[in-house]
Image (cartoon, rainbow, N blue to C red):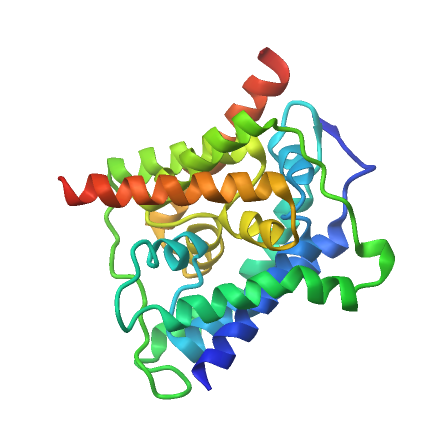
Amino acid sequence: MMIDWTNFSPWSAIFGGVLLGVASALFILANGRILGISGILGGLLPPKSGDTGWRLAFLAGMFVAPWVFLLLAPADLVSVPRIEANTLTTVIAGLLVGVGTRYASGCTSGHGVCGLSRLSPRSLVATVSFMGAGFGTVLLVRHWL
Amino acid sequence: MHRLVEFLVGLLFGLGLILSGMTDPGKVLGFLDLFGAWDPSLAFVMMGAIAVGFFAFAIAKKRTTTIFGGALHLPKASHIDKRLVIGSTVFGIGWGLAGFCPGPALVSMASGQIQALWFVCAMVAGMLAFEALERNR
């Protein structure tokens, strides 16, 4: 195994991760809900009366985040995202992520962060499955095709 | 009051995704590329998140209400079935193809990134397809 030391960023990764943990902690303890993005978004498709306000408020917070980050963060923390996939691949990927996360009732946040935090065997199986599929897909695309 | 908390938690979560590098598809693919030049950063994201989440959910499990006295919805499902494994695998393939998972895709779309907009439109279409399939089951 070869480590990519140039891109390795343990400190921003840990602090960013702690923020994700704090947000998930506040959401379960103050709002009583699991912070899972695919579930929060999927619950709006279609919207059910009396169950939309909290979802929209949460998403609105997420949507202003990149702009707040630009205002607050020191310039050396602001990086330009590297996009590799072309538009067709991106659309196929989006479809798979949409269908897959709804069938599995969760994604990286709901199963990965919250599920593993509460030691759920079901979420561990989900996390191992999507991580394994992710590793396999990148192996195939980057090294075999 | 509740709407404000939800907004702020969404903001905090979005900031965490950006700071951690999850909104950079190149970084995500670098983590998923075990057999190339591997960037282990995202394993540290999970460690940071779970280190906090573990204690929060340990407290949540002992409570019946939230700190505001509202209902506390902990998941009841515990079964491990084909839907969970196949659904997660399909999700993982999509994640590995583009380097976006749902949260970072939404944040990147909001920052004005066109590729993320395509991804989110397709993801919403996929979620709607799921709803349609479920209704006809």
Give the x, y percent position of residue A107. 43, 48
At a point 76% along the width and 62% down the height, the residue shown is: A70
The residue sitting at the top extreme is A145
In the picture, the quarter occupied by the C terminus of chain B is top left
Determine whether, in the image, residue A104 is placed left or right of residue B38: left
Q: Nearer the viewer, residue B23 or A109?
A: B23
At a point 40% along the width and 56% down the height, the residue shown is: A41
Q: Using the image, determine if residue B29 lies above or below residue B131.
A: above
Quarter location, residue A32? bottom left
Determine whether, in the image, residue B23 is placed left or right of residue A116: right
Residue A132: in sight, yes or no? Answer: no
Give the x, y percent position of residue B67. 42, 86
* Count of numbered circles on the image: 0
Q: Using the image, determine if residue A72 lies above or below residue A30.
A: above
At a point 33% along the width and 45% down the height, the residue shown is: A102
Residue B102: in sight, yes or no? Answer: yes
The residue sitting at the left extreme is B137
Determine whether, in the image, residue B22 is placed left or right of residue A100: right
Give the x, y percent position of residue A20. 58, 62
Q: Which of B114 and B105 is in front in this view?
A: B114
Give the x, y percent position of residue A100. 37, 38
Quarter location, residue A63? bottom right
